Image (spheres, rainbow, N blue to C red):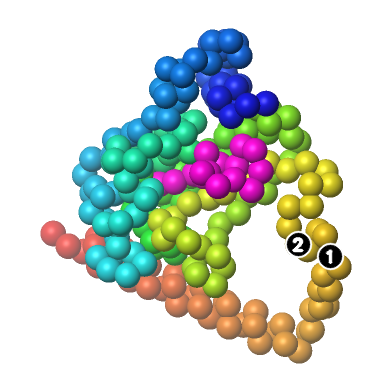
Amino acid sequence: MSPPRRLAVLCSHLRPDGPAPSAGEQSEAAVASAVSTSTCASGGGAATGGDGGGDGDSAGCVFCRIISGEAPAYKVYEDDVCLCILDSHPLAPGHSLIIPKHHFPSLEATPPPVVAAMCSKVPFLSNAIMKATECDSFNLVVNNGAAAGQVIFHTHFHIIPRRSGDKLWPTEVTSFRRRSIEPNETSGLVSCIKEQLCSTLEGCKTEASSLLKKP
């Protein structure tokens, strides 16, 4: 299936009220319209967000350029909070990215309501992508941080359609030995994680309480 036809089928699943264009209708003009741009959400500007430097700087962020309309992308879905586009270097046909419209360099820097909004679209989008690519499985991947493989420091989720036997990951091609969990090591790790969670929750409660006391 050609990229324009695949995009048309994907759009038909995202917008079931209208029929998908036939292969013959995929003219150069139709393909050009598919490479669409979107406008940044107002009030906070993805083009000027971030922490102002390094990996968090949105000045040269390709996703911010797509959102602001400065760069093209194959857009398959958009709402007030996020955008879904096809990956320009896909690991598999239909490999898509869910991107927030405001610039957040990492998952931990992304506000929970934004993460929730992105996650809420995963079933809807993945179902359409799987139908369009004739797959029955997918990977949902977040590369958070350089060591985890993050290249573009603007939070995003990968939806990667999968087929049985596609051997996409090296661990599916070669034997990968996983070490059994060790109780002595694990008890200390669990305690440490719980302490971090408690300190985070206490910090959130203190911040919320101080906000409530303000006149």
Task: Please rate how many residues cluster around mark 2, counting C-alpha atoms within 10 Å: few if below 14, some from 14 to 19, many from 20.
Answer: few
Measuring 55% from the left and 65% from the top, which residue is drawn there?
A: 149
Q: Is mark 1 on a helix, strand or loop?
A: loop
- In the picture, the quarter occupied by the N terminus is top right
Q: Where is residue 201 in the image (x, y as percent from the top left)?
A: 44, 70
Please name the predominant secondary structure of the magenta segment in the image: loop
What kind of residue is marked 2?
A: Pro
Cα separation, mark 1 vs mark 2, equals 6 Å
Q: Dividing the picture into quarters, in which one does residue 135 lie? A: top right
Q: In which quarter of the view is residue 73 placed?
A: top left
Nearest the camera: 95 or 111? 95
Residue drawn 62% across the image and 33% down it: 129
| The disc label shown at residue 162, or none | none
Neighbour tally class for label 1: few under 14, some 14-19, many 20 plus, Cα within 10 Å: few
| Image x and y of residue 118, in percent | 48, 44
Mark 1 touching mark 2, by CB under 8 A?
A: yes
Q: Name the residue under label 1.
A: 174
Rendered position, 19 above or below 121? above
Q: Does the magenta stretch include residue 205?
A: no
Q: Is residue 49 left or right of residue 188?
A: left
Residue 186 drawn above or below residue 166: below
Q: Position of residue 112 (x, y in %)?
A: 43, 54
Q: How many marks?
A: 2
Picture layout, residue 192 above or below residue 80: below
The residue range painted magenta reads 86-100
Residue 33, image x, y percentages? 41, 22
Which residue position is annotated with label 2?
170
- What residue is shown at x 65% (from left), y 79% (from top)? 190
